[in-house]
Image: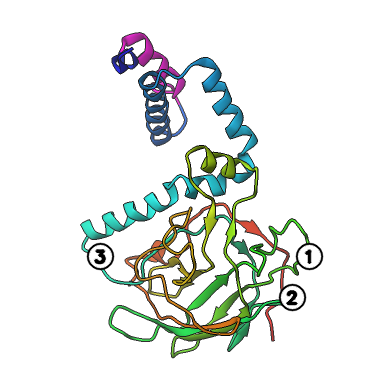
Amino acid sequence: MDVEFVRTPEVQALFDKAAGIGAEGGSERLKVILRDIIEASAEIIVRHDVNESEFWNAVGFLQNGAPEFGLLVPGVGLEHFLDLYMDAKDAEAGLTGGTPRTIEGPLYVEGAPLIEGDVNLSKDDDETGHLYMTGQVRGPDGEPVRNAIVHVWHANSQGWYSHFDPTREQTPFNNRARIKLGDDGKYSFHSKMPSGYSVPPQGATDTLMKAVGRHGNRPAHVHFFIEAPGYRQLTTQINFGDDVFAADDFAFGTREGLLPVPQRQGDSAYIAFDFELQRAAGVTDEQLSSRQRATGPAMEPAE
């Protein structure tokens, strides 16, 4: 059947009513967005002749996979698409330069301790080497960014993040910190070496990746938020450029300019990496997005 069926008066009236078009109250913006989602979904059903069993199997998959939506979204490229879309809007507005943004992922935890100086991220023993990372946060004219806070988090050597570790063996905020920088904008931290990892075996994301002939692996990487008064907040991550999955990240988090090759010595490594922030056009630019994030136990600032 032709997709023009979707645009017949009876079907269009159904979609209008389902989305609340013409009804009093509610968000007009949400109504038109929901209306477009419903119509786009209907077009897919008709275009591919989706039958009843296929439709409800898909609904069941999404229901069963609800805890993994944070992995499914990057896995199907939508989180990276948002980065590309924001890049395109920046280019259209004449905003250029700065360290590339890339996906946040679903594993940030609010409330990590605020620490100054050379920071040790790892609170737990781990049978692996050390990662040493140093650099500077600069502005668009090369100036050191004062009073910046660098949020940093990464997995342990088994590929597990604290607060999301099914073994429940990690200390809260292991391999997580907020680093308060001085006037020179320089940062340094060390930690137990992170590892790349795969999505949970037999989970919803793994099931979907295999069904479309893809894998669910990520390279070793370190996540960052960087915020400072007067500068645009940056969400990014560096991926180890010598990792076997550096060029084939299932979550599309690798981007040009974010693939430093570690200087390795045995099972330890050193990475030098500088960040460049754009200037903020307003207070909103300085803030993190309102994405829902996990919250950890309250922590006193480290001495």
Q: Closest to the observer: 73 or 172?
A: 73
The answer to whether the residue labelled 1 contacts the one labelled 2, judged by CB atoms less than 8 Å apart, is yes
Magenta residues, start to end: 8-24
Eyeballing the image, is 133 above or below 61?
below
Q: Which of the two discs, 1 and 2, labels the residue nearer the N terminus? A: 2
According to the picture, the residue beneath numbered tag 1 turns out to be: 169
Q: Which of the two discs, 1 and 3, labels the residue nearer the N terminus? A: 3
* Residue at 66%, 59% in the rendered image: 295
According to the picture, the residue beneath numbered tag 3 turns out to be: 95
Eyeballing the image, is 144 above or below 222?
below
Q: Closest to the observer: 176 or 9?
A: 176
According to the picture, the residue beneath numbered tag 2 turns out to be: 124
Spatial CA span between label 1 and label 2: 9 Å
Say if residue 301 shows up in the picture: yes
* Residue at 28%, 82% in the rendered image: 141
Q: Amino acid at mark 2?
A: Asp
